[in-house]
Amino acid sequence: MKLNTLTAHELIAPLDKGDISYIDICNSIIEAVEQKDKKLNAIAHFDKAAALERAKSSKGIPIFIKDNICVKDELTTCSSKILEGFRPPYNATVIEKLLAEGAVLMGKTNMDEFAFGSSTETSCYGVTRNPWDLERIPGGSSGGSAACVAADEAIFALGSDTGGSIRQPASLCGVVGLKPTYGRVSRYGLIAFASSLDQIGPVTKDVEDAAILLKAISGHDQMDSTSVDEAVPDYPALIKKDIKGLKIGVPKEYFIKGTDKEVKQAVLDAIKKLEELGARCEEMSLPHTEYAVAVYYLVATAEASSNLARFDGVQYGFRSSQAKSVIDMYKKTRQDGFGDEAKRRIILGTFALSSGYYDAYYLRALKVRTLIKQDFDKAFRKYDAIVTPTSPTPAFKIGEKSKDPLTMYLSDIFTISANLAGIPGVSIPCGFTKKKLPIGLQILGKAFDEETILRIAYNYEQATAWHKTKPLI
């Protein structure tokens, strides 16, 4: 079996025995990238020679990093023209943690520009394709991370999740994607989209690898004021306990009209399997779910318009050469440097924060955000976890929704609430449509209780074989 097709925990034993080397793993991944990525376009930046050089001096598993996470002296562009040629002078905290574990940084994955999207169609490097069907999107914004893991171009990868950007592409590509609790993983070195929503998390081939990677990147960081000083559990050991007696809520608001019939059935079948494994599942309600999309696109765009004000062409990145004055340079740089979706969100966020509309839109959105969080707080007094579909539909065709922003925004309807509430969520494969497109099951948990959702995910995964099916690319 080719080494690139294995998981990190499957590689540990042959490495310990000396049957394989870290260079062997690296070479296997390089071969896969060279064979497959011309079709997929999952990788934004890849330096074969540099990766091999790192592998010689490291004793760890190779990993790909989303293009909005800073790696010292390596291209980090958020897949945007406005950050053309930008090489950060420092590492993100998660990168420092991975390097301390010996990880080999292979390169950067493609993404929606500044993480603005649900399809990885807005990248300045072109669209990433779904390895299960090259005519379809991989999801977004971490579509490159999900696609390269699904296609065995990577052992695992890091993504970021602001409204579902790890979980939704994981669902559409048939891999595992975890959004940790807000504050569990340091955001220092993550180029911000919406600072109160963003989280870095793992994209992996199975749940055990997600647990391994989460443990490696978690922990308090003085460089991030929103990082929480909470003990990091031994996730890989704890997830293997059974789930007998766990009480799981199934919110009726997540099975609404518009949810694909095959998606709904796959999730209902997964719930039956959880019951067979000893969990108690029952219908419940999260009444403010219907407002989540509206709240998210006010809060997230407001924060984005502020965060993206720093990109002006003065100190780094793209600068327009057509300007006649300093003010003109600012205007032309941002006009030419940002893509259409980035401009749309900056405009929407600036509008929401403007003096005439701040109270009517932004402040009201924050109040409803609190109500959404309170729904979860109340639910978790009764339930250990909540299960839902990850995405209302399987992967759609490239270009199908790109001209209809509202329809595109609704792609994240089931994942957004977890970010608004700051709770952890994981997506795991739970079936396929008749067209062989992956379907994901989302498991949500209490703040800082990633252990329970990973336990449920692991037990379900061990009782099924969905995660073992690979795309034919």
Image: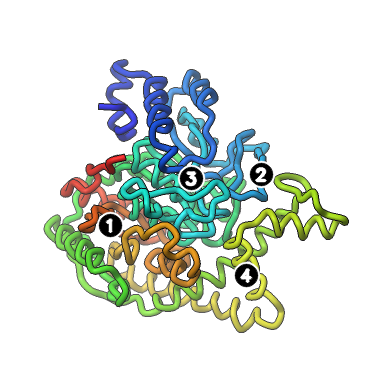
Q: Quadrant of residue 344?
A: bottom right
Q: Earlier in the sequence, mark 4 or mark 3?
A: 3
Assign a secondary structure to mark 3.
loop
Amino acid type, callout 1: Ile
Residue 114 visible in the displayed image? yes
Q: Which residue is mark 3?
A: 219
- Please tell me which residue is depicted at 67% across the width and 50% down the height of the picture: 82
Please tell me how crowded label 4 is: few (under 14), some (14-19), or many (20+) other residues with Cα within 10 Å: many
Q: Does 121 sit above or below residue 284?
A: above
Amino acid type, callout 4: Gly
Q: Position of residue 128 (x, y in %)?
A: 45, 48
Q: CA distance from mark 4 to mark 2?
A: 24 Å
Q: Which residue is mark 4?
A: 349
> Which disc is residue 439 wearing?
1
Looking at the image, the residue that sits furthest to the top is: 18
- Please tell me which residue is depicted at 23% across the width and 74% down the height of the picture: 283
Looking at the image, the residue that sits furthest to the right is: 325
Q: Earlier in the sequence, mark 3 or mark 1?
A: 3
- Please tell me which residue is depicted at 30% across the width and 54% down the height of the picture: 452
Please tell me how crowded label 3 is: few (under 14), some (14-19), or many (20+) other residues with Cα within 10 Å: many
Instruction: Tell whether label 1 touches label 4 (CB within 8 Å).
Output: no
Q: Earlier in the sequence, mark 4 or mark 2?
A: 2
Amino acid type, callout 3: Gly
Coloring applied to the structure: rainbow
Which marked residue is nearer to the observer: mark 4 or mark 3?
Answer: 4
Please tell me how crowded label 2 is: few (under 14), some (14-19), or many (20+) other residues with Cα within 10 Å: some
Instruction: Tell whether label 2 touches label 4 (CB within 8 Å).
Output: no
Q: CA distance from mark 2 to mark 1?
A: 35 Å
Q: Quadrant of the N terminus?
A: top left
Instruction: Tell whether label 3 touches label 4 (CB within 8 Å).
Output: no
Q: Which residue is mark 2?
A: 84
